Image: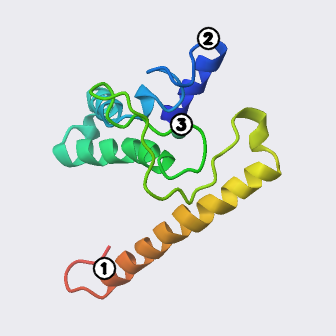
Amino acid sequence: MLPDADVIGFGLGIDYADDWGHRGATHSLAFAGLCAGAAALAWREARSLVAFLFLTFAMASHGLLDTLTDGGLGSALLWPFDQARIFAPETPLRVSPIGAGFFSARGVETLLSEIRWIWLPCLAIASVGRLARRHSPGPKS
Ligand SMILES: [Zn+2]
């Protein structure tokens, strides 16, 4: 959720399309790596390459998923090297209303869209992984 903290910029006069505007720098792969590095400095358990890559991917997933939405500007995934706002070739996710609008019929549509396109596929993949792990030789956990 940290990347969307950039919405405070609206109140500070930062334009949506600015580098530090909504879906700008905080949605980039570089920012994801910086946050993973900061986590490693602050949290001993995060001081491994695997943890760094996991945290970077987790943070980057926000910007990547925002490229799948059907509104607003795309994500500045390649900031600071390229300020272009990027959308995926397909945009099946309903864009979320910002602020109090989230608690509206459109917000419910957004949640249903995210359940359909993100949560159910993730649940299916996790279930297959769990089944595969259960039926594989080796230590169980
Ligand atoms: Zn976002």
* 89 to 10, vertically: above or below: below
In the depicted view, which residue is nearer to us: 20 or 111?
20
What is the crowding at mark 1: few (fewer than 14 residues within 10 Å), some, or many (at least 20)?
some
Q: Amino acid at mark 2?
A: Leu
Label 2 crowd bin: few (<14), some (14–19), many (20+), radius 10 Å: few
| Residue in the picture at 61% in, 20% down | 8
Judge: label 2 CB < 8 Å from ligand 1.
Answer: no
Label 3 element class = loop
Mark 1 or 2 closer to N-term? 2
Separation of marks 2 and 3 at Cα, in angstroms: 19 Å
Quarter of the rendering containing residue 93: bottom right
In front of the other: label 1 or label 2?
Answer: 2
Q: Is residue 94 above or below residue 56?
A: below
Crowding at dot 3, Cα within 10 Å, few <14 / some 14-19 / many 20+, comes out as: some
Q: Nearer the viewer, mark 3 or mark 1?
A: 3
Question: Which of label 2 and label 3 is nearer to you?
Answer: 3
Ligand 1 neighbours mark 3 (CB distance < 8 Å)? no
Q: Position of residue 87 (x, y in %)?
A: 45, 46
User: What type is the residue that disc 3 sits on?
Assistant: Leu
What SS does tag 1 mark?
helix
Among the two numbered marks 2 and 3 on one chain, the one whose residue lies closer to the N terminus: 2
User: The C terminus is located in which quarter?
Assistant: bottom left
Residue 5 coordinates in the image, percent (x, y)? 55, 28
Residue 78 is situated, as x and y percent measured from the top left of the image, at: 31, 34
Horizontal relation, residue 6 to residue 36: left or right: right
- Which residue bears the numbered disc 1? 133
At label 1, which amino acid type do we have?
Arg
In front of the other: 39 or 141: 39
Residue at the right extreme, as displayed: 105
* Residue identified by numbered label 2: 12
